[in-house]
Amino acid sequence: MVDSEFQPKSGNESPRFAMPSTFMRLPSRESAKGLDVAIVGVPLDIGTSNRSGTRNGPREIRDESRLLRPVNLTTLQAPFDCLKIADVGDVPINTYDLRKSIDLIDGFHARIAKQGAAPLTLGGDHTISYPIVRALSLLHGQLALVHVDAHTDCNDAMFGEAMTHGTWVRRAVEERLIDPRRTAQIGIRGTTYTGPDCTYGEEQGFTMLHAEDCWHRSISRDMDRIRSIIGEGPAYLSFDIDGIDPAFAPGTGTPEPGGLTSMQGIEIVRGCRGLNLVGADIVEVSPPWDSGRITSLLAATIAFEILCALPGVEAA
Amino acid sequence: MVDSEFQPKSGNESPRFAMPSTFMRLPSRESAKGLDVAIVGVPLDIGTSNRSGTRNGPREIRDESRLLRPVNLTTLQAPFDCLKIADVGDVPINTYDLRKSIDLIDGFHARIAKQGAAPLTLGGDHTISYPIVRALSLLHGQLALVHVDAHTDCNDAMFGEAMTHGTWVRRAVEERLIDPRRTAQIGIRGTTYTGPDCTYGEEQGFTMLHAEDCWHRSISRDMDRIRSIIGEGPAYLSFDIDGIDPAFAPGTGTPEPGGLTSMQGIEIVRGCRGLNLVGADIVEVSPPWDSGRITSLLAATIAFEILCALPGVEAA
Amino acid sequence: MVDSEFQPKSGNESPRFAMPSTFMRLPSRESAKGLDVAIVGVPLDIGTSNRSGTRNGPREIRDESRLLRPVNLTTLQAPFDCLKIADVGDVPINTYDLRKSIDLIDGFHARIAKQGAAPLTLGGDHTISYPIVRALSLLHGQLALVHVDAHTDCNDAMFGEAMTHGTWVRRAVEERLIDPRRTAQIGIRGTTYTGPDCTYGEEQGFTMLHAEDCWHRSISRDMDRIRSIIGEGPAYLSFDIDGIDPAFAPGTGTPEPGGLTSMQGIEIVRGCRGLNLVGADIVEVSPPWDSGRITSLLAATIAFEILCALPGVEAA
Amino acid sequence: MVDSEFQPKSGNESPRFAMPSTFMRLPSRESAKGLDVAIVGVPLDIGTSNRSGTRNGPREIRDESRLLRPVNLTTLQAPFDCLKIADVGDVPINTYDLRKSIDLIDGFHARIAKQGAAPLTLGGDHTISYPIVRALSLLHGQLALVHVDAHTDCNDAMFGEAMTHGTWVRRAVEERLIDPRRTAQIGIRGTTYTGPDCTYGEEQGFTMLHAEDCWHRSISRDMDRIRSIIGEGPAYLSFDIDGIDPAFAPGTGTPEPGGLTSMQGIEIVRGCRGLNLVGADIVEVSPPWDSGRITSLLAATIAFEILCALPGVEAA
Amino acid sequence: MVDSEFQPKSGNESPRFAMPSTFMRLPSRESAKGLDVAIVGVPLDIGTSNRSGTRNGPREIRDESRLLRPVNLTTLQAPFDCLKIADVGDVPINTYDLRKSIDLIDGFHARIAKQGAAPLTLGGDHTISYPIVRALSLLHGQLALVHVDAHTDCNDAMFGEAMTHGTWVRRAVEERLIDPRRTAQIGIRGTTYTGPDCTYGEEQGFTMLHAEDCWHRSISRDMDRIRSIIGEGPAYLSFDIDGIDPAFAPGTGTPEPGGLTSMQGIEIVRGCRGLNLVGADIVEVSPPWDSGRITSLLAATIAFEILCALPGVEAA
Amino acid sequence: MVDSEFQPKSGNESPRFAMPSTFMRLPSRESAKGLDVAIVGVPLDIGTSNRSGTRNGPREIRDESRLLRPVNLTTLQAPFDCLKIADVGDVPINTYDLRKSIDLIDGFHARIAKQGAAPLTLGGDHTISYPIVRALSLLHGQLALVHVDAHTDCNDAMFGEAMTHGTWVRRAVEERLIDPRRTAQIGIRGTTYTGPDCTYGEEQGFTMLHAEDCWHRSISRDMDRIRSIIGEGPAYLSFDIDGIDPAFAPGTGTPEPGGLTSMQGIEIVRGCRGLNLVGADIVEVSPPWDSGRITSLLAATIAFEILCALPGVEAA
């Protein structure tokens, strides 16, 4: 049983809308030392191609996470009883230089990983997953990837740039940070520039679950299949909130109608239970475009479900 | 056939956005005398634990109800041809004192019930269901309860207080206002403080339909089952708009992703047809957090569907 | 292969949020001469009965269409490789006089049709479909109609007026502009003034697919049936965004909870592939009531899917 | 002393956000019989040239008027102790036909005037002032006009139409409804189509107070001058909320930066005390474009200050 | 020179939108021990009479305070070089019981005061000033009061309740917590229930500066006068954001048009320099009603200006 | 007299909300050849330090400019009768790389200038003024600068970067692009990192007009002084919308309370008449943070006033 110091502040101790404004009102820590999981923020939005605003994501996700209570009502899991979890704050990115920021994100996550903690990172635009995966794969070896998204993020370049929120998966494949045969993309849909672009993943061996494949039904079974494909090696979960339909997640930069539902989003995360997750992120929440803060709240909920899916969190 | 005086003002008489701003532009009445159904507002939000704003609920639900026409297009029911329905205004709550307000709400509804009318109450936070149920059970005896909600509202206390929007169901059970064996909770999900809390209802004999049990499918069959469990005794329907997913109902105080759809919400209300409903409420609409007023409109629609589900409203 | 002059400006040429603000950043043309498809705007909102604001629809749909790329990721169709498509701007309606505006819309579309182009029209309230259908039926003969909507638009009059956004379908039937036996209405729901009103379409021989018939499932099969009923004659698709549920499309004037999902909306349009579409519209987007511009984006996406469903666009 | 029946419902009787939602929670009356002042709504927006939405104005102004208490804290005037004032609801306009609506508005106000009450009308777009002035001048003879506005509303035609929100003053001059030598326009600014247009009023003998003349200072002295020009004959006050700067009144259809402040708006109304006002309006509030409902609240406040400026309301 | 540990985190160390989300990104402290000034939050909104939402005030003011830099550009004051200032978090109020909350607020501030720090409190509705003043006057003796507000807060009761956001000043006078002859109220305006109510303060000897007295001009001279009236005894500054006009501060619960400008608000605070301030608050910020977060930002700026006005902060 | 081809499309030709969505519905041109003034957009926001979103500025300013008519009602100037003005679209910036974007902006403006046109540029964050000034000074020689802003933009570096929206003025001084003795900064206020930073401009010889110097009064006289200081050499006007107070311009990235009013903003631009302006910009409009689009409308109005202030536009 984990020390009570790592319990979220309860709504019965002080109202939910009171301080501290860390994730779920967890304790704040300077470093990940002694932690099992480190909650990290990366307030980046200069890697995005359509609407900006994800720089405000980490603060708003933390703010809305105040509503969450420590036990999963459905699964009865209690992650804070099983793991030492704290909020280690934000990566001090350079908001004027994307490449420097990528190195800062890599360094920050490398430190966390070396201290033995799994990072759960709140974005920020999707560019941030590249340096995180780079840092984690250096320690853990090539990673499996569960990638929820409306977009494949497999463009070769955007406006001539190799490193953006739409190219990071291709870079991760090329640099062997992730194992394409143990990579699954879920929620892909919409439009693309040319035919070949959207088949890149399939050629690499990705398991593809287009949004259309998911419509009107549960995808828990698909997650069983994905788990069996991925197996026991180190895995990473990257959850782009735009994988979810704009009705459920309006506050994002490149929304695409016809997406997954929040329910399917939760099914995906619960379906990751059993994987050897060494890190995860929830990205692309853009508060200025949100309504009633429902996107931030959904992201906070997904983040909590990720905590429940981590190795070491026992089922009730 | 009911007197034409109790018909909503038609959009062909004056535009929908014109006066009066009673529910569905029904006549306004000082008391429930002579009515079959009394529409009541309770603009309370001091019983809430996260975001406030439900004090503005009754006015906005009434405002958005302007769009509703008197015949249910699907069921062809015409409640205003079958029942005398008017808007009796708002309970003059004391906005600084929750306990005094509870007594004011109880008194107001007791009067309505004694005058022979069924109250259909527009909230306000969920605390209001406690005094309503107390008033109605005094007249009708112990009630069956159909309870749509993300939360069980079965906490023993919140911040040490026995009476809040999160404890009212437990109080109603303890005081034998409702019959736990004829109580159904639908839409429950999310997180909780401790394991035992969320099993309270099951121990009492509640019929539980978690949100997850409802995902991706019709729940009309489940309503058949619930109706047969409840049987013919007096019943109450309490519809917390946060039972519905935040995509459909963002304007609420304690939203929880992964909820019921509006479609399922309508199925539930239609599935109550045949019950001996002696009152109903639709609560927790918080307009300051709404987007495009869709939550108020949904609440108004649910309220109309409740009218169609009342005893005495004939099928077409 | 169509000339590259008719390609949308790519996000790799200039950022998506840069000029031009035509539909999908297509070229702007003064007339439809030489075009296969003409994108038209009709910024009308004086035919509406509840909330106004659709006058801002065409500009916002065009603005949000910036996110769309030229290839359909799912069907791999590339409409701009198959058809010459440009944006011909807005009909110069008279915003103070509904009847004059109807004639202006008719004349504008008649010219487009005579120049050999199919109009894809961005509304504007639904009144605009009447003059478009009138103009097209004059050239093509009586039309089949696929009509997505929450409302039948078959009122005889509204506030005594024969021509409004709620009466246009009845007028089109009476004037034999559309063939009622080859007319399908999808998404109908909500409330109505009297029983008979809502059975008008059935009496005329319409194929009706109520919203309730569509809940929780795919409607692709229903579209197969509708296609076989309509057959090979000239057909028109009129897509009222309020056919879609307010969660997915809050920005509209007469929203009705319990509607179609965006996913079903896309299924409908894809299900129109194979019809002899001679024109189409997407109407009733009201930006002042939108949240995060998701309704405008959905409308832009539906418009793109319509382009993919047009005769002459080959499957990949 | 006026009967207590005509007192607004106090916030100590029921909370401000509770029913009724008449203006200032005054009693609702079917007709103006026996009243000194009738509060009227005209939910019209089809006479507007830029952004629509004023159809929602009357309901929102009434809603926000809940905050107002019966005594003017500065002048200590208590209009409800001096005059019998009630809310007579909305004119049942025809939302599809501007000309028919003009006649409906005229007839409604003629009836009020004949019953001996002064109308205080909540708009709606500015077109409504024409039929009101027409009705009142028929009874009272040619009227003086105090006209607060960003625009002169002296266009000869808009899009070829003689009667719109931008032409009504010229029509009123031409038809001798108002006396141009006893007409003052305050707040005029911005841009215009041609030079001559903006000098029309001056040629007619209007007293002009451009916004620039008012910047950075009190305009109470100017009101003294205007009062002396107008003298003792019957006068009408037409207050277009867009006379006020968009910072103070964002919720309007044709906002123009560089306008009057709210403080100056109040000075104008207080400066009308002593005029023989036979009616007044506050128009062009467009709630869908408002922020935090501050425009509706300002309009409600202006309406209350108008009540205090009416003949018969004694100074404290 | 104060230790660098008490400097706000600079925007050159980590971007402004990154953690920590304390006031101005100051260090967080468990207690006020060793501090000169303690920043406190009180997330209360159950003492309010119109619109709720101030419970979200402290978090949002802190969030927007991220933009503030440590040196006052105009006065060149650098409060963090002169005083030890930290953020001690929020009072754990009881959100269901106003009276219990009042005692919790009193106790929290009494502790701070005893530890030798001056509290700068972020509200929360204005009820909170009563327990703060009670706690401080116990230690420092009767206080002078500079009270910026649209309302006198001198009602005897609201809805029968003695303790609300509209009665606290009268209670503080009656209990001799404040010295009425050294009390100034600035910004008073609007409407009231009865004549006598609004003269209460004058009868007690308050210095009154109505909003109208302030329009269109600097009020620095008035502050000189107020400072000379107050003299050298302990003083408290209570700044209700609704003293400021809704154009500048829309996000509040009881907005009143015709108020002070932000510029005058800053003049007031700068005019308090030289007073022996033993505490201060900025209250009534209601984020759900804000636009573009400008009210929270203004409140954060006022709070910073208060820091500059405190005894011990040297002029540059 | 300029050819009618360069007149904005009138609201009497097609409604204001109809196409085209160029600035003021002017003609669109591929290049500046033959133009006197070229309207340019620069949709950049990656040079900003607090809130992003200015990438959406150019489109929204153009959209709201639809309300503007061609004649200045106050000055009776008619810029389109005097100058050939068209909209040349947006600079195709690289949204992932600030330095590359700076060169793209420079090149685009250099071409315009060489073609003999003065650029009027719609931003975009303030970084864009650096490359514009660089391009123009190469052609015209060292420039005078009228700089409206809350901030001096004279930081040496931000987060170690030499080129951001907060450093551009210092760079322009260092590289002798602007003449510090003929540079005026208006509206400066708020907070800063260190004392010396904010005196940099004064040391260089800038004329400083702090916001506080402007409060409560006209600044036309100050503009007379500034004009005489600047004299007849080539001059540039850079108007950061955050120079204006957040009440009037909430939609911006680094708002600072206590700023200039819109009225003063217009006085500044009118006060530039007589200067030899070779270019101008209006920057930092961030639509996602705007309310009721009033910031975009103000920016459009400022842009129109700039057109009226250009050499060659005759007074009426």
Image (cartoon, coloured by chain):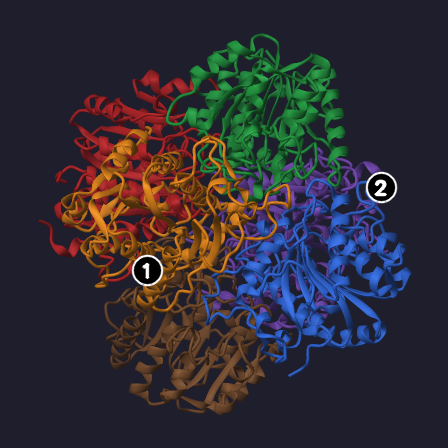
Chain colours: A purple, B blue, C brown, D orange, E green, F red
- Discs 2 and 1 lie in a common subunit: no
**Residue type, numbered disc 2:** Val
Whether residue A240 is visible here, answered yes or no, is no
x and y percentages locating residue C27 in the rendered image: 30, 64
**Residue neighbourhood size for the residue with mark 1, other residues' Cα within 10 Å, grouped as few (<14), some (14–19), many (≥20):** many
Horizontally, residue B108 falls left or right of residue F68, namely right
Could you tell me which chain the residue with mark 1 belongs to? D
Instruction: Tell me which amino acid carries mark 1.
Output: Gly
Whether residue D247 is situated above or below residue C288 in the rendered picture: above
| Front residue of B205 and E137 | E137
Q: Which residue is at 78% across, 65% downward?
A: B236
| Label drawn at residue F152 | none
Q: Is residue C94 left or right of residue B227?
A: left
> Which of the two discs, 2 and 1, sits closer to the camera?
1
Query: Depth check: A280 or E180 in front?
Result: E180
Q: Position of residue B67 (x, y in %)?
A: 53, 66
Reply above or below: D31 against E54. below
The picture places residue F81, in percent across and down from the top left corner, at: 13, 48
For this orientation, the residue located farthest to the left is: F1
Q: Which residue is mark 1?
A: D47
The quadrant the N terminus of chain B occupies is bottom right
- Secondary structure at badge 2 equals loop
Q: Is residue D264 visible?
A: yes
Q: Nearer the viewer, residue D239 or F116?
A: D239
